[in-house]
Image (spheres, grey):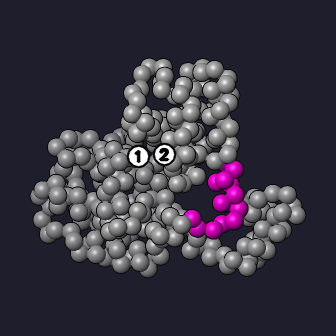
Amino acid sequence: MSKPLSESTIKMYDVIMNKIANDTGTKRDANESFLRDTSKIIAYVSTKNSEHTKKNYYATILSFVRRLKFTEAIIAKYDAKMMESAAEVEANYESNQMSDKQKANWITSSELKSVINKLKADVPTEVDTYAKYRKLIRYLVILIHSYLPLRNDLVNAKLYKDSDKPATLDKKINYIIIGSNPHIVLNNYKTEKTYGEKVLALNAECASELLKYYDELTSFSEAHWFLVRENEDDHLTNKNFIDLFQSAFGGKKIGSTMLRHVAVSELYQVSPEQYKKEEALASVMTHSVGTARLKYAKVLN
């Protein structure tokens, strides 16, 4: 039996379904009938450059066609395409090489620090309009992500001082708590079903900046949303968040996933020669390099 989908995954799948329907000139209905035209949908997904994107699209489609009990023939067609994309993604993981898109948009940690300094300098002295507030939250979001390589989890986060936080935290909402022990509480995130509530410590710089701008931030949201929409006391959508995030990097398409790649790549810093050795050993042991590192490699000192 498959695991129930998290709320964040359900929202992501819904966004993808809307995009597929819009881009193919069709409309969604209760039975997602447009997915029955497998040739049209597969042709559309094939136009995507990223195998990750194709895999995510097919995972979404399969979730719906299985739940809605489409014919076995339709499910099999989508499942076969899903397996193709998954194999390509796995092959890319095994080679550990950057894609062309990643190369074009890569950023080093030192370059990221320069971006943060520019964003900080761009924060207005008075934050009394939404345009100014947007500059502030853009700076704070990138600052936090430079220390904590999260996914898009800040979209659904509320901000509180420790002395003001609710007695009971909503398990469907993430929280940023600042005080003597500044931290982020993740309740609503991609792998929540596996790891449950996660509490991540906030470093001194992030905590200090959040405290400095606490009054300005909360003045835009009585509900205490960290990232609030214009003229509406509700959190940003994922699309809003992506647009905000990418606007910090000029013409580069850098999102939270890219910063996760950067964080891991700079931590491990494996040379091509070393990786080839690891790959060769993994081949002999009939498993992946990732399995070797996580399950077999031990700390020797």
Q: Amino acid at mark 1?
A: Asn
Q: Residues within 10 Å of mark 2 (few under 14, many from 20)?
A: many
Position of the N terminus by quadrant? top right
Give the residue displayed 48% in from the left and 45% down from the top.
189
Residue mark closest to the camera, 2 vs 1: 2
Of residues 142 and 245, the one drawn nearer to the viewer in this rendering: 245
Q: Give above or below for 274 relative to 231.
A: below
Residue 171 in the figure: left or right of residue 235: right
Q: Disc 1 designates what residue?
A: 174
Whole-number angstrom distance, CA of label 2 to CA of label 1: 8 Å
At a point 45% along the width and 68% down the height, the residue shown is: 105
First to last magenta residue range: 86-99
Looking at numbered disc 2 in the image, what kind of residue is underneath it?
Tyr
Residue lying at 22% horizontally and 55% vertically, measured from the top left: 217
Q: Quadrant of the C terminus?
A: bottom right
Q: Is residue 92 magenta-colored?
A: yes
Instruction: Estimate the x, y position of residue 216 in percent, counting from the top left.
Output: 18, 57
Query: Which residue occupies the foreground of this view, 247 or 82?
Result: 82
Contact, CB < 8 Å: mark 2 with mark 1? yes
Which type of secondary structure does the marked residue at label 1 adopt?
strand
- Residue at image x 44%, y 79%? 110
Q: Is residue 176 visible?
A: no
Disc nearer the start of the sequence (2/1): 1
Label placed on residue 189: 2
Q: Which numbered dot is residue 289?
A: none
The chief SS type of the magenta part is helix
Mark 2 residue element: loop
Residue 246: quadrant of the picture: bottom left
Q: How many marks?
A: 2
Q: Position of residue 2 (x, y in %)?
A: 65, 31
Quick one: 218 or 233, which is closer to the camera? Answer: 233
Relative vertical location of residue 3 with respect to residue 57 in this rendering, above or below: above
